[in-house]
Image (spheres, rainbow, N blue to C red):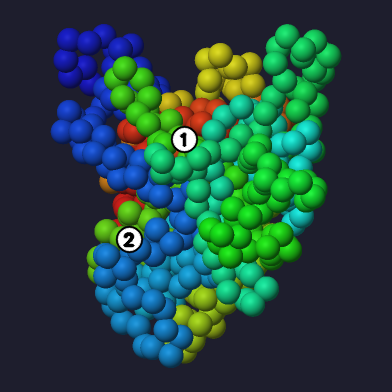
Amino acid sequence: MELTNDKTLGEQLSEQLLENPKNAALLMSDEEISTADSFCEGYKAFLNKAKTEREACAEAIRLAVEAGFKEYDPEAEYRFGDKFYFCNRGKSVILTVMGEKPLAEGIRLAAAHIDSPRLDLKQHPLYEDGELALFKTHYYGGIKKYQWTAIPMSLHGVIVKADGRSVTVNIGEDEGDPVFCVTDLLPHLAAAQMKKPMSEAIKGEELNLLIGSRPFKDDKASKKVKLNIMNILNKKYGITEHDFVSSELEIVPAFKARDLGFDRSMVASYGQDDRVCAYTALTAILGCDKPRHTCMTILTDKEETGSDGNTGLNSSYLPYFIDDLASLEGLKGHTVISRSLCLSADVNAAEDPTFSSVTETRNASKINYGVVVTKFTGSRGKSGTSDASAEFVGKIRKMMDDGEVIWQTGELGKVDAGGGGTVAQYIANLDMDVIDVGVPVLSMHAPLEVTSKLDTYMAYKSFSVFFED
Ligand code: MN
Ligand code: MN
């Protein structure tokens, strides 16, 4: 190597041979930083509108229609440039932009999930105890239960009534709405509770939601607080207690997405796993116009419970859909699937300086170091993962670098510290090349999760670049 300036050979060799990661804020121009900040205004608005998988699906479709997408018609013929969406049971959606190349050359797929950890109502939720009205809940996804007490909660979902008609519920989000909460013990009387391990301090059956306290005025009726609540619900929604058996009601934190930090560099919000990747993969497909390969964003449900179920990616709804598209060009579905590439768009755990003992710093993702590329997830000896090939990592790496995406790699914690999975393995099992790409998150699965605006913007940029492949 030649000495080209006044740096020593060691300095030059260090620059050329060694990795030298930098904070994205130091690499990006002021203009691009402000573009990233404005991008996250749209992201926060999405978070506030889309607090459940159903709401995220509806909001994604609303934005898609605004961007010129039409509802998928199995009878229609699709050509280069056509944009359409397929909604699966109101809880997941596939957005497609037809490419210039035939489908035989494969699809570029970004897959994010729109379900988040929360509390679901049981099928017989309503009861009265100690002259208070409460809902029994069953938590959904992996939560630290103690985090879900003593914070304002809202109620979202649908109730299908005896006559088959469905009502939509969304209460606790508007300024004037009431909220709900799971109560916790005061410290003065929590001596025994505080000695318990955190996993037992609040038990699943203690996640009871407080919803009312005033009795119905009547001398003879019993359980008058419960009756009063049921009477209010009957007037508002036309339901009776038995209608809860055919409902899906979800309790989520009633917080709004907010800027975090004096420098407003981060977003604090519920549900960023994985709506941060859902929003970025969505905006990338909405901005995708006349791509070379056919491009697709899938926003799926049920990832947090293992992807099983007919709206989760362990089901056949994605291969069925691709099969239908393939048949339009006289192809078999598996021909298209086997030649397709996928970015499994999901978050990773950002290194937390307060809890750095669980991460291995050379291989952990960091806030503000860009979008995270994760070669494998899983736990123990790489069980429960797909592990992308060196060839595919090489392709994605080059794509990111050529597209000026700031990116980093990250493993989910130290070896044997725990682990987790994404939808990548289910997509890989279809015979597709897939790798995890997403945003680093602090306090993942907590009622309030934290992401960096620059990382979020880089995720959007990475999906956009992928769709240009
Ligand atoms: Mn996730
Ligand atoms: Mn998760």
- Between 98 and 362, the residue placed more toward the observer is 98
Please give the name of the residue rendered at 58% of the width and 74% of the height, measured from the top-left corner: 165
Please give the name of the residue rendered at 80% of the width and 17% of the height, measured from the top-left corner: 193
Q: Does the residue at mark 2 contact the one at mark 1 (Cβ under 8 Å)? A: no
Q: CA distance from mark 2 to mark 1?
A: 23 Å
Residue 157, percent from left and from top? 56, 57
Tell me, yes or no, if residue 439 can be seen here. yes
Local SS, label 2: helix
The type of residue carrying mark 1 is Phe
In the picture, measured across the screen, residue 82 lies left or right of residue 317, that is: left
Residue 438, percent from left and from top? 46, 42
Compared to residue 369, the image places residue 71 above or below, namely below
**Residue 72 appears in which quarter of the rendering?**
bottom left
Disc ID at residue 63:
2
Disc ID at residue 225:
none
In the picture, measured across the screen, residue 243 lies left or right of residue 363, that is: right
The type of residue carrying mark 2 is Leu
Compared to residue 405, the image places residue 25 above or below, namely above
- Between 444 and 158, the residue placed more toward the observer is 158
Local SS, label 1: loop
In the picture, measured across the screen, residue 104 lies left or right of residue 308, that is: left
In the picture, measured across the screen, residue 367 lies left or right of residue 405, that is: right
Residue 46, percent from left and from top? 37, 48
| Quadrant into which the N terminus falls | top left
Compared to residue 200, the image places residue 123 above or below, namely below
The residue wearing badge 1 is: 255
- Between 359 and 309, the residue placed more toward the observer is 309
Q: Is mark 2 within 8 Å of ligand 1?
A: no
Compared to residue 130, the image places residue 154 above or below, namely below
Q: Around disc 1, counting alpha carbons within 10 Å, would you say few (fewer than 14), some (14 to 19), or many (20 or more)?
A: some
Residue 378, percent from left and from top? 67, 42
**Residue 289 appears in which quarter of the rendering?**
bottom left
